[in-house]
Image (cartoon, helix red, strand yellow):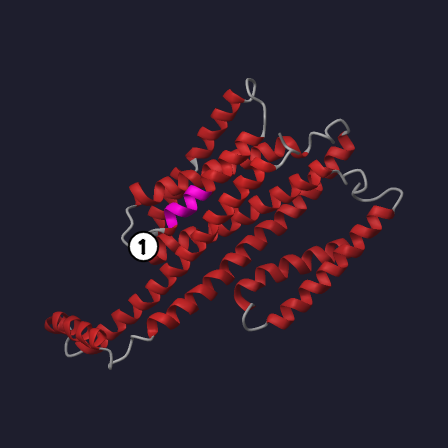
Amino acid sequence: MALASGSFLLLYVLQRSQYDFFSDLMLLAAGLGAGALALYYALRAMHRHERPLLELRTLNQPRYIVGVGLFTLCYAILGANNFMLPVFIQRTLGFSWQTLGAFQSLGLFSALAGWFVMAWMLPKWPGARKFLVAGFLALAVSGWQLSRHNGQADLWTDVLPALLGNGVFLMLVMATVAMQTFRDVQHNEALLSHAQQFKNMVAQFGMALGVGVATIVLQWRTTAHYAVLNNRFHEGDPAFAGLVEQLANSLAPGSGGQAMPTALAYLGQQLGQQATLAACLDYFGAVACIGLLGATLMLAQRLMK
C-alpha cells in the first residue's frame, strides 16, 4: 500500500506540476513530501524484510546504482525533449503537426543506425566508455544546434541534424547502460527480474520528471523573456510606433477600418512567439551543457569501462 500510494502521489505531483506549479506550489510540495515519505517507508521495509517484494539489499551494488541513475537521466531527457521539440518546431517555427511528426520520425532513424554501428563494434571493441562519451557528445551537439536559431531555421539543414543527434544519444547511451547495469545480477533470474522491475519503476518517474521540468522551464523562461520584450511594446517607443503604423498602412486596403487593431494583435502574437522561442533556446542551451557534462563524467568514470 505504501509503495502504491507513494508512487501514485509522486507521479501525480510531477504530472500536475505542468499546470499548477506556480499557482499551487505549496499543495504540490505537500503531495511530493507525502509521496516521498511513503516510498521511503516502503523501500526501508523491503530492505529489512526477510522475503521482500523487491530484493533491494542484493541490488545495492555500485554498477547497478549508477546504471539506474543514468537510466533515470536518459528518461528525463527523453520526456523533456519530447515535450520541447514540438513546442519549438510547431509553435515558434510555425510548421504543421504533420511536418513535425515526419521530421521527428526521420530523426529516430539515427537510433537504428547507431544500433547497427554498436552491433558491428561490440564484438571487436566491447568497452562501454566510448559509446557513453559519444552518446553524450551527440546530445551536446544536438542541444547546441537547436540553441543557435533565430526563428528562421530550415528543417532540413538546421533542425534535422539535431534530431539525428538526439536519436544517436538515446541509442548509444541507453543501450550501453542497459548492457552494463544488469551485468552483475544477470546470473540470478529472480534477482534480474527484481532489478528490471525497479528500473522500470524509476524510469516512469524519470519521464514524468522530465516533462514536468521542461514545462516549468518553458513557463519560467517565456515569462522572463516576455517581460523584457514587453518593455518596448508601448506607444511611446519610436520603433514600435513606426512598426505599427507601417503594418497598419499595409493592412488598410483589406481590413475594413480595422487596420490598427489588426496590426496590434499581430504584433502581440509575434511578441509571444519570440518570447517562447527565446525560452526554447535557453532550454536547448542547457541540454548542450548537460551533454558536455555527461561526456566529461563518462570519460572520467572507471565503473563502466
Q: Residue at 52% of width from left, 33% of height from top? A: 172
State yes or no: residue 192 in magenta.
no
Highlighted range, magenta: 140-146
Magenta residues: mostly which secondary structure?
helix
Residue 17 figure quarter: bottom right
Task: Please state, as top left, top right, bottom left or bottom right, where the N terminus lies in the image.
Answer: bottom right
Left or right placement of residue 27 versus residue 58 in this view: left
Place residue 297 in its image quadrant.
top right
- Looking at this view, name the residue that lies furthest to the right: 50
Q: Sort mark 1 into few (<14), some (14-19) or many (20+) by Cα contacts within 10 Å.
A: many
Outermost top residue: 124
| Camera sees residue 100 | yes
User: Count the marks: how many?
Assistant: 1
**Regarding mark 1 in the picture, which secondary structure is present there?**
loop
Left or right of residue 189: residue 172: left
Residue 12 found in image quarter: bottom right
Q: Is residue 208 left or right of residue 183?
A: left
Among all residues in the image, which is located at the extreme front?
A: 300
Q: Nearer the viewer, residue 286 or 118?
A: 286
Specify whether 16 is left or right of 197.
Answer: left
User: Relative to residue 239, is residue 88 depicted above or below?
Assistant: above
Foreground residue among 251 and 144: 144
Looking at the rendered structure, the kind of residue marked 1 is Leu
Residue at left 65%, top 39%? 67
Q: Which residue is mark 1?
A: 93
Name the spot of residue 6 as percent of width and height, x first: 72, 58
User: Residue 191: image x %, image y %?
Assistant: 77, 34
Picture coordinates of residue 151, whole percent (x, y): 30, 55
Q: Quadrant of the C terminus?
A: top right
